[in-house]
């Protein structure tokens, strides 16, 4: 019999992160959001709690947990704030995970311990300004091998730019893994991934974007002008970069689905609290059937979104095919987040339009969940192709690193 009940270990983690979100994040995050300021102290405390190392083995400085544990943490954090949650998601699923999955022993030893402790962050350099969802077709960033400074040494020379990159410009960012065209023949591009450490000459980090939501997270445009890194900074096999990043994005969609489901549940949490406190026409809001039904619909969406990412994460953990389930989870949960945020704002009325109330942040944060790490249209395309519909071929269209 299938059970969706959490193990004792996972439930203990969920409760620990929920307490952290409630006691540490909730009292101060609105100020960071309004100031558009990165919450370094919160991130440091998340690192001490072990959240950045959850899915990695202890030999690399991790907690020896699993990907499901990471998703649980994201869900509980997003019930309170998505800026903090996306910082963790991008730092682990998009930043450190490529190093762990595709890096050699030296690369893992150099980068993973600090990343697992949350003392440093890594970024995922995929999306380009003119590319959008068409990653391979729109890619313009190139990397070529050239003679290095030492005898017999060679270096990658990188030119191009990346857009919408999370965690790329913080004071604790240590590296960006960059996808670049490294060759090609017969009209086919050879795409590889290369580690570029922060501070490398020729690597310029742009100013922080002025965003609608996720205002306490770091998002930048990156530029590379004759940026040189050692040949050994190639991550994994040459020419396998795009395949690597597709795998990373499949995993990342499960994580984003968990974050989205958390936001959807956070909307329910806030509305239940408000409906029990706010009075209108002589009764608490929770007295009115219209409010009851609206919150009931919100709870049903949040529940469905949670089950969707549970299923995808369980398949990922078991080593089963999960591409379709990841896309379903991401589509379902992001829709639930957006719908619940809209309904929560309506229930709060004028107060829902005030940034001092969490639902206002939820409303601003929800929209990007239908865009980042593959738009809703891309998720539908992946699902359709997994069902055997349409033209066969790789599922392109990955956006929002």
Image (cartoon, rainbow, N blue to C red):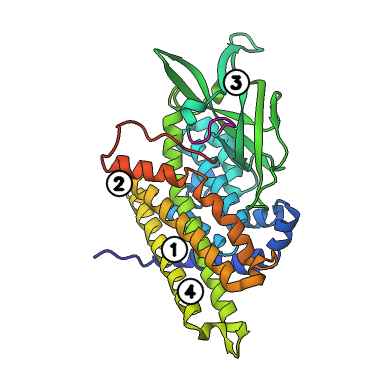
Q: Which residue is mark 3?
A: 230
Residue 158 position, x and y percent, is 61, 21
Residue at 57% over, 86% down: 284
Residue 74 position, x and y percent, is 52, 57
Left or right of residue 343, residue 26 in this image: right
| Of residues 86 and 273, the one drawn nearer to the viewer in this rendering | 273
Distance from disc 4 to disc 3, alpha carbons, whole Å, reads 55 Å
Q: Which residue is mark 4?
A: 295
Query: Which comes before the other along the chain, label 4 or label 2?
Result: 4
Query: Which comes before the other along the chain, label 3 or label 2?
Result: 3
In the image, which disc is placed on residue 10?
Answer: 1
Left or right of residue 345, residue 246 in this image: left
Residue lying at the far right of the rendered structure: 35
Find out whether residue 129 is within the magenta segment. Answer: yes
Distance from disc 4 to disc 2, alpha carbons, whole Å, reads 35 Å
Can you tell which of label 3 and label 2 is closer to the viewer?
Answer: 2
Left or right of residue 275, residue 36 in this image: right
Which portion, as a residue range, is magenta? 128-133
Image: 307 above or below 127 = below
Q: Are marks 4 and 2 in contact (CB under 8 Å)?
A: no
Can you tell which of label 1 and label 4 is closer to the viewer?
Answer: 4
Find out whether residue 21 is within the magenta segment. Answer: no
Q: Which residue is mark 2?
A: 320
Can you tell which of label 2 and label 1 is closer to the viewer?
Answer: 2
Mark 2 element type: loop
Distance from disc 2 to disc 1, alpha carbons, whole Å, reads 21 Å
Distance from disc 3 to disc 2, alpha carbons, whole Å, reads 36 Å
Distance from disc 1 to disc 4, alpha carbons, whole Å, reads 27 Å
Label 4 crowd (10 A; few <14 / some 14-19 / many >=20): many
Residue at 54% over, 77% down: 272
Quadrant into which the C terminus falls: top right
Can you tell which of label 4 and label 3 is closer to the viewer?
Answer: 4
């Amino acid at each position: 019999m299938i059970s969706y009940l959490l193990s004792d270990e996972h439930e203990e983690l969920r409760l620990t992160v929920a307490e952290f979100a409630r006691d540490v994040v909730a009292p101060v995050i609105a100020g960071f959001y309004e100031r558009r300021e990165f919450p370094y102290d919160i991130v440091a405390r998340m690192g001490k709690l072990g959240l950045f190392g959850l899915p990695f083995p202890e030999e690399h400085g991790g907690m020896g947990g699993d990907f499901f544990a990471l998703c649980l943490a994201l869900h509980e954090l997003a019930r309170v704030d998505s800026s903090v949650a996306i910082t963790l998601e991008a730092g682990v699923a998009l930043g450190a995970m490529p190093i762990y999955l595709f890096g050699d022993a030296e690369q893992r030893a150099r980068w993973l311990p600090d990343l697992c402790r949350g003392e440093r962050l890594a970024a995922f350099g995929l999306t380009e300004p003119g590319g959008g969802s068409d990653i391979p077709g729109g890619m313009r960033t190139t990397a070529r091998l050239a003679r290095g400074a030492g005898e017999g040494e060679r270096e990658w020379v990188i030119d191009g730019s990346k857009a919408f990159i999370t965690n790329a410009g913080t004071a604790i960012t240590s590296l960006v893994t960059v996808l670049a065209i490294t060759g090609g023949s017969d009209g086919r591009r050879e795409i590889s991934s290369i580690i570029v450490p922060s501070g490398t000459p020729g690597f310029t980090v742009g100013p922080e974007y002025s965003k609608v939501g996720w205002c306490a997270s770091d998002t930048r445009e990156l530029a590379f002008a004759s940026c040189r890194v050692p040949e050994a900074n190639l991550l994994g096999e040459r020419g396998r970069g795009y395949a690597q990043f597709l795998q990373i994005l499949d995993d990342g969609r499960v994580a984003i689905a968990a974050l989205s489901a958390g936001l959807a549940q956070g909307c329910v949490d806030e509305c239940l609290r408000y409906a029990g406190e706010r009075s209108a026409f002589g009764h608490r809001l929770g007295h009115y059937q219209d409010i009851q039904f609206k919150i009931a619909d919100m709870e049903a969406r949040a529940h469905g979104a949670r089950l969707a990412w549970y299923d995808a994460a369980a398949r990922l953990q078991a080593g089963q095919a999960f591409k379709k389930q990841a896309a379903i989870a991401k589509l379902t949960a992001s829709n639930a987040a957006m719908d619940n945020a809209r309904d929560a704002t309506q229930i709060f009325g004028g107060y829902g339009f005030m940034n001092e109330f969490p639902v206002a942040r939820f409303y601003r944060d929800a929209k990007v969940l239908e865009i980042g790490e593959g738009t809703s249209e891309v998720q539908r395309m992946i699902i359709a192709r997994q069902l055997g519909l349409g033209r066969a071929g790789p599922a392109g269209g990955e956006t929002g690193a």
